[in-house]
Image (tube, helix red, strand yellow):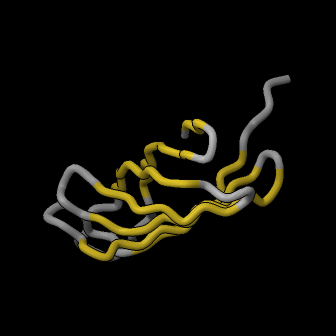
Amino acid sequence: MFEDGENLRGRYRARYVVPDRAISPEVAFTFQGTAGSTVAELPWVSGGGAEGSIRLELLSENKLDVKWFARNPGKSMGLAYGQAVLVRRLEP
């Protein structure tokens, strides 16, 4: 993610566990928009024509809650929504 004043842009890429399903576990998209102080709700798009919304919430200095859902799954997107808590690892 990159922040320029109130503007936030970035890429999200994840591989989710999808047991017993014939859909791709891969998720990749880009997002851009205006960020709040600790919460941002931004539109996203993927190369396969999918589009949706992502909600980023800063839980602490090193934790970010990511929730996303697809409004239009496009040609290549298999999952309709997902959630992850990202933790920044500090080097010793």
**Horizontal side, residue 45 vs residue 43: left or right:** left
User: Eyeballing the image, is 71 above or below 5?
Assistant: below
- Image quarter for residue 39? bottom right
Q: Which image quadrant: the N terminus?
A: top right
Q: Nearer the viewer, residue 31 or 19?
A: 31
Q: Residue at x 59, y 38 (%)?
A: 3
Q: Residue at x 29, y 65 (%)?
A: 51
User: Eyeballing the image, is 9 above or below 20?
Assistant: above
Residue 20 image offset from top left, x and y in percent: 33, 76
> In the orientation shown, which residue stands out farthest toward the front?
5
**Horizontal side, residue 30 vs residue 49: left or right:** right
Q: Which image quadrant: the C terminus?
A: top right
Q: Residue at x 73, y 59 (%)?
A: 38
> In the orientation shown, which residue stands out farthest toward the right?
92
User: Eyeballing the image, is 29 above or below 2?
Assistant: below
Q: Residue at x 54, y 54 (%)?
A: 34
**Horizontal side, residue 72 vs residue 15: left or right:** left
Residue 11 image offset from top left, x and y in percent: 44, 44
Residue 57 image offset from top left, x and y in percent: 68, 62
Q: Nearer the viewer, residue 74 or 5?
A: 5
> In the orientation shown, which residue stands out farthest toward the top?
92
**Horizontal side, residue 54 vs residue 45: left or right:** right
